Image: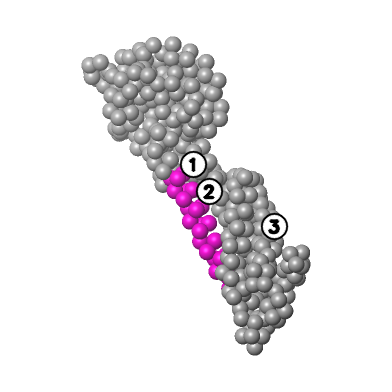
Amino acid sequence: MKHFNFILAGRNIFRNTRRTLLTIFLIASGLAALLFTDAFVRGISASMVKIVTQTYLGDAQIHRPGFRQSNDIDLYLKENRALFQKIEKQKEIKAYSPRTITGGMLSSSENVASAIIYGVDAEKEARLSKIKQTIIKGQFLTGKNGEIIVGEGLADLLEVKLGDRLVVTVSQANGGELSQELFRLSGVFYFDDRRMNKSIALINLQQGQAILNIDGVHEVALRFNNIHDASDDSLLLWKILNNDNLETLSWRELVPQLSSILKMNSFSTLIASVIISVLVILGLINSMFMSIYERQNEFGILLALGTRPRQLFWLIVLEGFYIGVISIISGLLMGVLISYWKSVTGIDYSGVEISGVSISEPIYLLINELSFLKIAASILMVTVLSCVYPAIHAARLQPSLAMK
């Protein structure tokens, strides 16, 4: 009888071909939409992390404890050679860039503006961030004294062009005396982030140390071979690079708002899953009840001939299972093909700003095979469970009433 149920259930699902195909299309479309949403959320999350970390921030940063909270230029890292040797021994770290950081005034012959002035090692910085690639006028720092590069917005505010003189005024560490130095504009960079374009200037590291009168750096930005290592708290390097004099934080701690955005992205996938699951449940219940009402006389005869209610229950559940399997196969094909297409061509979001992060390149969808299989299995489970209520209703039919 069980074998008979399998055969009968397979035949029954196409007794009304149009309704069955519409139901399959509903479930398959919902699954394809979920797969696309999952791949899109993964892609946009990866793009946002990449933009934030690779532009200038780095995957992690080292400071003196308290520097990030106070921006006190007196809190700088000393004994740099020993620190750099520790960093170079860590196999997870691909590149690092030491920096001095201070607020100051930039004066041109036309205007005055405040800015954050970074002193950087040109060679190391080029390996870690994208500053060099964003130069739109002039050239990147070469290590010579007197070089300075600024964002396009800051250059417009100061009304300067390549070769023009800029006077940088800062307060020195360990005393606060004013220090002034003459520079010539050697390059202009452009980011999609307006704040960086209007508020950042870069000079060579040695000159940054000289005008601040320090023999150390305020920050060391780190680039990992694998960005996922920045989220791995079990790595030994976090213990090595964190002590009473060092504070090493990953991008998640440096930009907590981005971590919150990524969590919200995952939550949005969950919401989409719930909505689509509800649509699948309602659509399938409606379809199964219509099928049951059309076959009440048939079910009444089966029950009158000795078919047990339990067998009728499993017959309806099997029909739903078959519909679910066909829908899942169709939905997987649709979802994988569309997601793969956009993982290659990308979706152009250039110029769009999401929660303060400017998207500067296409978003390429990321396909996670395990996640796709889990979503497909969940939809199949929802499909089968949706048939339980109609199946219970069919099993409780009274033969005499059903045959009328």
* Disc with the residue nearer the chain's start (2 vs 1): 2
Check the image and name the residue furthest to the front: 306
* Disc with the residue nearer the chain's start (3 vs 2): 2
Residue 145 found in image quarter: top left
Residue of label 2? 41
Q: Which element type, helix, strand or loop, lies under badge 2?
A: helix
How far apart are labels 3 and 2 at the CA level?
23 Å
Circle 3 or circle 1, nearest the eye: 3
Q: Is residue 272 left or right of residue 158?
A: right
Q: Pinpoint residue 65: horizontal percent, then vertical percent.
A: 33, 23
State yes or no: residue 283 in magenta.
Answer: yes
Residue lying at 23% horizontally and 19% vertically, measured from the top left: 176
Relative vertical location of residue 283 with respect to residue 304 in this rendering, above or below: above
How far apart are labels 3 and 1 at the CA level?
32 Å
Residue of label 3? 329
**Mark identifier at residue 48:** 1
- Work out whether residue 227 or residue 170 is closer to the camera in this orientation and state it: 227
Kind of residue sitting beneath label 1: Met
Q: Main secondary structure of the magenta part?
A: helix
Q: Which residues are magenta?
A: 261-287
Residue lying at 52% horizontally and 27% vertically, measured from the top left: 224
